Amino acid sequence: MRWKGLIFLGVVIAVFVVLSLIFTDIWLENKLERTGTTIVGAKVQFDNVDFSFTGLHMRWDSLQVTNPKNTMKNIFTTGPTGFDMRLAPLFSQKVIIENIQMTNVTSGTDRTTDGKIEQKRKEKKSTFLTKTILRLQEKLSEAPAWNLDDYAQKVNVDSILKILNVQSPEKIDSLQNSLVESYQNWSEQLDRKRWQNKFNEIEEKVKSLEPEEIKDISSLQNSVQTVQQLQKTLDSLQTSIKTMSDSLQGDLNTYKTKISLVDNWIRNDVQRALAKAKLPSLDKQNIALFLFGQKVVSQAAAVLGTVNTVRSYNSRLQGEPKKQSPPRLKGQNIHFVKQQVWPTFWIKNIELSGHTTRGLALGGQVKNIVSQQKVIGEPTTFQIRGSRADQAALQLEALFNYLGDGPKEKFSLSVERMPLTDVELRQAAFLPTIQQGRGALNATMDIRENQLEGSLSFKSHNVSFSFDETEPDNLIEQRIQRVFNTTTAITVNASLFSATEKTDFSLDSNFDDLLVEQMTKVLGEDLKEARQKIENTVRERVSAYRQNIEQLITERTAKLQREMKEYTDMLDDQKKLIEEKEEELKERIEEEKKKAGKEVKDRLKGLFD
């Protein structure tokens, strides 16, 4: 028993000696800096890392994490920090830390040296999040620049129209040729020789029947039958004429409606001319994007970029066994859950305390920074709060949940009573800076695998602005200054929705209506005049072509309708002629019947006399 105890003690001592030789403070500090720098994409620097095997304690004097977007500033720094690690997991190459106390955490501090690193450019795998970032940046770049020089200058309409290729005349000519061919086809179908002979034949037969010359009832009755047979022939012609008349009228109506195509072509020419002229737009959305779009999009892109990085590292660190497809009649290794399983890396809790460069006292908690969430069954959460003596307050909450089938992240930021001092709206000489005021911000973002929704609401009050000392040199800039000088509040609202195939982003502010109203007063008449001149010029160029096709439709339609009416009139005349002839024949039959009856009576009377 004594020997076994000595052997165990010797093994433990040997392990500590080996570990102390491998994990020197300098080696560990370099290893931590290289790993952190790789993850952040900018320098991560530790100062005086000390690892003690007595109690497995680690500490450092300070930590700087460079902002990769601005490598002369830090994302955050810490003061002296220490924590303990658990011994048993180390033998399984696992790092488990119960609690870390990070004090004197500061954000946004200046660096004495540039934290930029040279990185080999690697083609990053395109993901839903990177596609969303690109779409947001494209929407921002597509918004027209708010260049007041464009507004101040008169539009040179004549030079635009010289290079404009008006397409309507060619299209109208093509349509006109098509209509001429159609009209010609109808003219051939309505050629009088087709039905005229039939009408003439019917008319000759009807006129050949002279009721006065027919003396017996039998012949008269035969003539009535002949007339009725001609009536049937005429009915058949009437059906044919009616069918063709309906078809013709339908085509003529279609030809008339085709004039609307001409209107569309002219309208398109006008729109292309206006687009060539690049007349400044007074769209409200353009103003909101110009004033606030860059700030909103850059913050959204920063959050999405962070989430994309976290997702990438999370997928690499899962360490889940791959599914096997064993050959036929072969076995498969089944991985059973161990009784006690540790993730590769796990910081259970971080207590934060510190301040920003503007004096906002920060405090908060980060739970479960872990390589495999499914092993511990808990998501990673952040809760940061801040306050200042002037009542400014901040609250940030974040959730990284990779326990289910798809990743989920959620963020919420609330800022209250935040002073606004020397805040630039946009790099433009004619725009002011916010001199003073207080604002409140509420922003949320909910990301679920390949879909996200976000919203932002910003409100400020008691706002005052300061302009460049230079006096505005044009009426537009004077109106803009007037708008800002008479406004004491700013409201901005943004919404974001993104899925695999599309991204919708909208942004509006209270300045939209105010600035549009003032600029419209100055520019409205000039823009209206320029647009009207362009439209009138295009329509003048096309008017002769339009008049020709309208005249063609009017004349050819009237001609075809006249020809069809002639056949209809002939039909009516023939019907009237047959009806009259039939009536005459019937009257003669009655006369003959009466005459025959009188003769019989006279004969009978002679027998009795």
Image (cartoon, grey):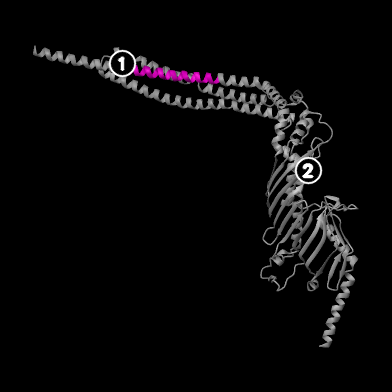
Residue 12: x %, y % from top left = 84, 78
Q: Residue at x 75, y 40 (%)?
A: 291
Residue at image x 88%, y 70%? 22
Residue 141 appearing in the image? no
Task: Classify mark 2: residues with Cα within 10 Å, few (<14), some (14-19) or many (20+).
Answer: some
Question: Can residue 251 be seen in this snapshot?
Answer: yes
Region rendered in magenta: 556-583
Q: Is residue 506 left or right of residue 187?
A: right
The number of discs equals 2
Q: What element carries label 1?
A: helix
Q: Is mark 2 on a helix, strand or loop?
A: strand
Could you say which is closer to the camera, residue 338 or residue 494?
494
Query: x, y percentage for residue 125?
Result: 76, 53
Locate residue 404: give its quadrant: bottom right
Rendering coords of residue 270 (x, y %): 68, 27
User: Which label sits on residue 436?
Assistant: 2
What residue occupies the far front of the structure in this picture?
Answer: 389
> Which residue position holds label 1?
584
Quadrant in the picture for the N terminus: bottom right
Contact (CB < 8 A) between labels 1 and 2? no
Check if residue 568 falls in the magenta segment: yes
